[in-house]
Amino acid sequence: MKITVKQIGKIHAVLGQLGLAGDKEYKANLIKTYSYGRVSSTKDLTFDEGKRLISDLVGLVPQPDYERGAKMRKAIFAMAHRMRWEVPGANGEAKVDIERLNNWCVQSSYLHKKLDDYKYNELPKLVSQVEKVQSDFLKKI
């Protein structure tokens, strides 16, 4: 199946976001890589090649809200450590039990979704919630 017009547009849009739209040589080499040397133009890609290329390119686009929320996610991780929501990690060091944390978020947090699914503007309230849970935990020990 041939690549769609929508896919071609998405590839060009994401290349633009990455500042690579004007670099024809780079784009041709990228297309060759994703087509295993078969073609050098987006219009000649297959649907699956286009899908794979789009997925990989989108992953390179900076996610400012996610990055801005990293500090709040780290605070939540620190509280999870204090509450001993941990599993053994490398070299015997404890690491946060992500599965437990995500299960708590889905079941008990105010938006009922996994930690990484919270947007930047939603994280302050989640941090407050986890602080309350941590406070209650620390009172019990």
Image: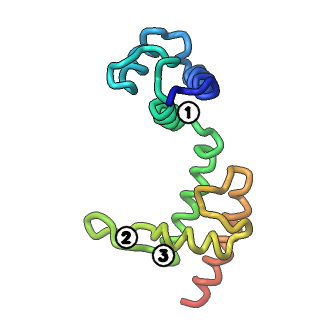
Residue 111: image quadrant is bottom right
- Which numbered disc, 2 or 1, marks the residue that appears first in the sequence? 1
Residue that protrudes farthest toward the left in the picture: 91
Looking at the image, residue 10 lies above or below residue 75: above
Q: Position of residue 119 (x, y in %)?
A: 68, 51
Name above or below for residue 22 compared with residue 47.
above
State how far apart marks 2 and 1 are (Cα): 32 Å
Query: Could one spot residue 106 in this view of the protein?
Result: yes
Tell me if mark 1 has few (under 14), some (14-19) or many (20+) residues whose alpha carbon lies within 10 angstroms of its own.
few
Q: Quadrant of the C terminus?
A: bottom right
User: x, y percentage for residue 28?
Assistant: 43, 14
Rendered residue at 73%/56% (across/down): 122
Residue 85's disc is 3
Q: Nearer the viewer, mark 3 or mark 1?
A: 1
Q: Is residue 37 above or below residue 100?
A: above
Which residue type does callout 3 highlight?
A: Trp
Q: How far, Cα to Cα, is label 3 from label 1?
A: 32 Å
> Mark 2 against mark 1, which lies toward the viewer?
1
Which numbered disc flags the more N-terminal residue, 3 or 2?
A: 3
Extreme residue in the front direction: 1
At label 1, the amino acid type is Val
Badge 2: residue crowd in 10 Å (few <14, some 14–19, many ≥20): some
Specify the amino acid type for callout 2: Ala
Q: Secondary structure at mark 2?
A: strand
Tag 2 residue: 94
Horizontal and vertical percent position of residue 10: 61, 27
Q: Residue at 41%, 21% (x, y): give it.
A: 30
What residue does disc 1 label?
61
* The quadrant where residue 21 appears: top right
Q: Answer yes or no: do the residues labelled 2 and 1 have beta carbons within 8 Å?
A: no
